[in-house]
Image (spheres, rainbow, N blue to C red):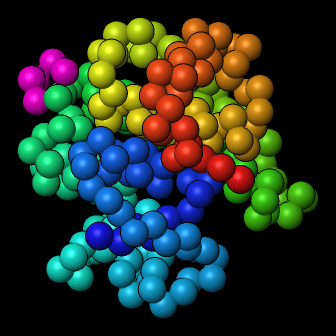
Amino acid sequence: MKLLYSKASPYSSKVRMAAHLCGFELDCVVTDTAAEGADLVENNPVGKIPTLVLDSGEALFDSRVICEYLDRASGNLLIPQTLEAWTRTKRVEALADGMTEAAIATLYEVRYRPEEKRHQPWVDKQWRRAHRALDALEREVAQLPAEPNLAHFAVASDLGWLQLRYPGSFETRNPALAVWFERFFADNPVYEPMRPQG
């Protein structure tokens, strides 16, 4: 299978970690979404990464859909199947990805909008969303099992992106989360190369 991805993308990072756990080797192809290259848009009309091209030639997109596919294809190695564990795993994934979506919105406001058109109250609202999610994640990670699953990968990937783009933005405010983040990679060094990188 071929993964169209970006090294900095937290969603690509999550998929790569998930694929490793599920035992799938991916042909990872660095893809520039701004260029809207044929390989990307022919496989994903939305033009976003990650996009997973299956051996059949069919494509899957959106990291959550890709991870669900990897889980099913592996016989549920990624997502716990008891109702309580499934609920926690998917809630944590949604919190982590929601935090990143809010933080990405602030980055795009600065990167793509002229300074005179930026709306600070909107940026502040996105940061409030991100901080509420981080506070919730700090409580949630304490309840995660020792063995990594999708929830671990979502949190590790999203915090890795936040640390890459906004260094120091959560480490002081959420010290327990920062400790969890460092410990995850220390305890699972195989995933270190898959964390978001600039």
Whole-percent x, y for residue 67 in the image? 28, 50
Q: Quadrant of the N terminus?
A: bottom left
**Residue 80 painted magenta:** no
Q: Using the image as rendered, state which of residue 135 and residue 172 is in the foreground.
A: 172
Q: Predominant secondary structure in magenta? A: helix
Seen in the image, is 113 located left or right of residue 66?
right
Whether residue 48 is visible, yes or no, is no
Magenta region: 81-85
Q: What is the residue that sits farthest to the right in this orientation?
A: 116
Residue 189: image location, x then y, percent: 50, 32
Question: Is any part of residue 74 visible from this angle?
Answer: yes
Q: Where 61 falls versus 44 (above or below)?
A: above
Which is nearer the eye, 110 or 179?
Answer: 179
The image quadrant of residue 130 is top right
Residue 159 appears in which quarter of the rendering?
Answer: top right
Q: Residue at x 59, y 57 (%)?
A: 7
The residue positioned 19% from the left and 46% from the top of the image is 71
Left or right of 75? Residue 88 is right
Instruction: Point out the residue furthest to the front here.
Output: 190
Displayed quadrant of residue 78: top left
Tell me: residue 96, above or below residue 62.
above
